[in-house]
Image (cartoon, rainbow, N blue to C red):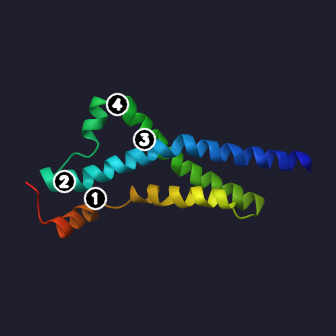
Amino acid sequence: MAATSRQNALTKRWLVISWFVVYPPTLAVVTRQIYEQSFLWWKFGPQMVGFHLAHTRPLLFAGGVLAVLLSHAWLVVLAWLSFRERRWPSPGELALCAVTLPTVLLLWVPVDWWQSMMAMFFGETGN
């Protein structure tokens, strides 16, 4: 019994540590992508999203893509552990999930939506 509780505590600790490693680059990638899909499109017209970053800093781009994939995996692992242990995540884990889930979901918002929001709020085009 003690080994199981110790293993659960270790799993929780690694879940939180991994979040602090994976989430910041994910946030940077999501922010950059939304910036390119909204403001740069509005200001300069159609963009090849991610093209500049991928071709000038390929390692940074690859690390960002990996971080986004790992953030998705982090959410799946949290859900799986909660299901397996038949418990709700702790308040701290729920807080991390409440931050991660919307960030990751922003990547799935269609480009057309960002563009229509920029056009609705700031006019048709900036150029």
Q: Which residue is mark 2?
A: 41
| Mark 4 burial class by Cα count in 10 Å: few <14, some 14-19, many 20+ | few
**For numbered disc 3, what is the local secondary structure?**
helix
Q: Which residue is mark 1?
A: 111
Residue 93: which quarter of the image? Answer: bottom right
**Does residue 50 appear to the left or right of 26 in the view shown?**
left
> Which quarter shows the C terminus?
bottom left
Looking at the image, is mark 2 or mark 4 earlier in the sequence? 2
Looking at the image, is mark 3 or mark 2 earlier in the sequence? 2
Which dot, 1 or 2, sits closer to the camera?
2
Whether residue 94 appears in this view of the structure is yes
Which residue is painted at 44% across and 35% down in the image?
Answer: 63
Which residue is painted at 42% across and 39% down in the image?
Answer: 64
Looking at the image, is mark 3 or mark 1 earlier in the sequence? 3
Image location of residue 33, percent across then percent down: 32, 49
Residue 109: which quarter of the image? Answer: bottom left
The residue under label 3 is which amino acid type? Val
Proximity of marks 3 and 2: CB atoms separated by less than 8 Å: no
Image location of residue 48, percent across then percent down: 22, 45
The residue under label 4 is which amino acid type? Pro
Which dot, 3 or 2, sits closer to the camera?
2
Q: Which residue is mark 4?
A: 58
- Real-space Cα separation, disc 3 to disc 1, in angstroms: 18 Å
Q: Which residue is mark 3?
A: 65
The residue under label 2 is which amino acid type? Trp
- Real-space Cα separation, disc 1 to disc 2, in angstroms: 10 Å
User: In the image as oriented, which residue stretches furthest toward the right?
Assistant: 1
**For numbered disc 2, what is the local secondary structure?**
helix
